[in-house]
Image (cartoon, rainbow, N blue to C red):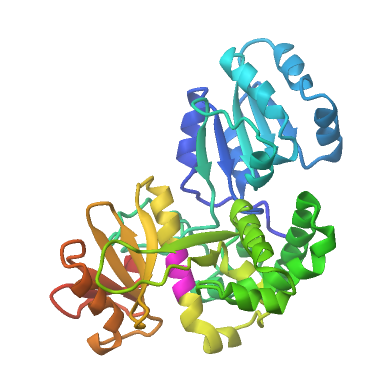
């Protein structure tokens, strides 16, 4: 992918460099091509004694699959304390016992990356509890683009990077925010690379999950699930349209969760008078990947036909990513009653909640916010204020407890 070696400001860099300096160990999970390898190589640049095990390389992978204990012998052959970088560790789960032995013996520290916890879980892999810190690397966040100059109205701001030139917020609604896609200078090439990404993902996951007999069904399911991203999926309809059973649909969604391709958002269901719909929503981790899988036109016409859905998708993903970056123990939900009242996002802080509606227009009125007003009435002790995220220019107070804010103020 042209431009893929560009290095961008990443929120996780400070955590990784601090871990390396303290000789601590970590596992960094993240979907494919979020920049895990680039981040770690940047953090380890100029440091001596680094041992590198890129498990994407067939020869390296085969050697360690045949003899996982070779890792122990190779580390023990080094003088002093080694830093070991294992990239895409889910490809050889048996390595984790060797890693634990070396950490417990204080013979090495490890930086490990992985794009899927599913294979590790299925193999009963020892994920080194109490020995490593676990992180998640997402696609680029708004502050990493340099877009959040006013951020902090709802969630605390995070340090911003330099503005990335030649890539706009509107482009991110079409092509997403994977670093490699952002680095490409041409939209037509971005379209080609996104299509290739979806094909590679499909091929790799079918191979990893032994789904060869279901390749057609899984492919159809991916397209349908992408089209319903951000909605409560009707699993019965998905079953009929993809040609597989309802239990298989649940299995497919489980695969998407475990390979970090979707964010699951559960309904907010604290005690209330109204009957709440209980089906979760799933948001694909990157809007560009969602668009490519859904087979929608990857051009600016998409902003005219589907802008509301794409804008909501972007805001919800940013909230989820910001909470991770700030290491907050918050939960993200949505709220929808059987009577039709709905709130796009509810941030559950434990003792209080913040309901948020997302509108792609520049201006909104209270008449547009029936769901938000209904939520405030239903939970007067939990929710004392609410927000509407818009594409406006400046914040606007709509009532005593509802404020409209531009997306950059989030």
**In which quadrant of the rendered view does residue 395 lie?**
bottom left
Position of 41 compared to 405: left or right? right
User: Magenta segment range?
Assistant: 312-317
Residue 91: image location, x then y, percent: 74, 40
Q: Is residue 133 magenta?
A: no
Residue 280, image x, y percentages: 48, 65
Please name the residue shown 42% across and 64% down the image: 147
The picture places residue 39, in percent across and down from the top left corner, at 59, 43
Which of the two residues, 150 or 69, is positioned nearer the viewer here?
69
- Magenta span: predominant SS is helix
For the N terminus, the image quarter is: bottom right
Q: Position of residue 204 (x, y in %)?
A: 77, 54
196 with respect to 305 (left or right):
right
Q: Is residue 208 left or right of residue 9?
A: right
Residue for point 69% across, 78% down: 240
User: Which residue occupies the extreme left position in the image?
Assistant: 400
The foreground one among 260 and 22 is 260
Q: How many marks?
A: 0
When asked about the image quadrant of residue 183, the answer is bottom right
**Is residue 153 visible in this depiction of the protein?**
no
Q: Residue at 24% across / 72% down in the picture?
A: 273
When the figure is inspected, residue 27 is found, relative to residue 108, above or below; the finding is below
Q: Mark yes or no: residue 210 visible.
A: yes
Image quadrant in which the C terminus is located: bottom left
């Amino acid at each position: 992918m042209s431009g893929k070696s560009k290095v961008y400001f990443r929120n996780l860099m400070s955590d990784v460099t601090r871990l390396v300096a303290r000789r601590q160990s970590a596992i960094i999970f993240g979907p494919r091509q979020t920049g895990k390898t680039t981040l770690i190589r940047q953090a380890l640049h100029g440091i001596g004694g680094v041992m590198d095990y890129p498990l994407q390389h067939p020869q390296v992978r085969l050697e360690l699959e045949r003899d996982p204990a070779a890792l122990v012998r190779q580390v023990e052959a080094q003088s002093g304390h080694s830093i070991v970088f294992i990239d895409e560790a889910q490809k050889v789960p048996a390595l984790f016992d060797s890693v634990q032995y070396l950490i417990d013996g204080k013979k090495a520290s490890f930086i490990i990356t992985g794009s899927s916890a599913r294979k590790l879980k299925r193999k009963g892999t020892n994920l080194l509890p109490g020995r490593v810190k676990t992180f998640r690397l997402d696609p680029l966040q708004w502050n990493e683009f340099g877009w959040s100059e006013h951020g902090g109205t709802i969630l605390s701001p995070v340090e911003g990077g330099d503005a990335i030139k030649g890539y706009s917020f509107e482009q991110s609604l079409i092509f997403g925010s994977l670093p490699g896609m952002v680095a490409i200078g041409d939209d037509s090439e971005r379209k080609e690379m996104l299509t290739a990404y979806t094909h590679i993902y499909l091929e790799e996951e079918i191979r990893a999950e032994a789904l060869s007999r279901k390749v057609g069904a899984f492919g159809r399911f991916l397209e349908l699930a992408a089209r319903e991203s951000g909605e409560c999926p009707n699993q019965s309809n998905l079953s009929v349209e993809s040609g597989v059973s309802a239990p298989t649909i649940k299995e497919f969604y489980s695969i998407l969760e475990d390979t970090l391709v979707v964010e699951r958002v559960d309904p907010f269901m604290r005690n209330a008078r109204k009957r709440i719909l209980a089906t979760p929503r799933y948001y694909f981790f990157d809007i560009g990947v969602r668009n490519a899988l859904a087979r929608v036109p990857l051009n600016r016409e998409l902003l005219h036909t589907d802008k509301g859905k794409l804008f909501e998708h972007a805001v919800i993903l940013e909230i989820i990513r910001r909470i991770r970056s700030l290491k907050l123990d918050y939960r993200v939900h949505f709220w929808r009653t059987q009577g039709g009242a709905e709130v796009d996002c509810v941030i559950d802080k434990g003792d209080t909640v913040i309901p948020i509606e997302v509108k792609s227009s520049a201006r909104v009125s209270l008449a547009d916010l029936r769901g938000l007003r209904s939520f405030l009435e239903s939970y007067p002790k939990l929710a004392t204020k609410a927000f509407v995220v818009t594409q406006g220019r400046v914040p606007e107070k709509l009532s005593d407890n509802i404020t409209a804010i531009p997306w950059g103020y989030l």
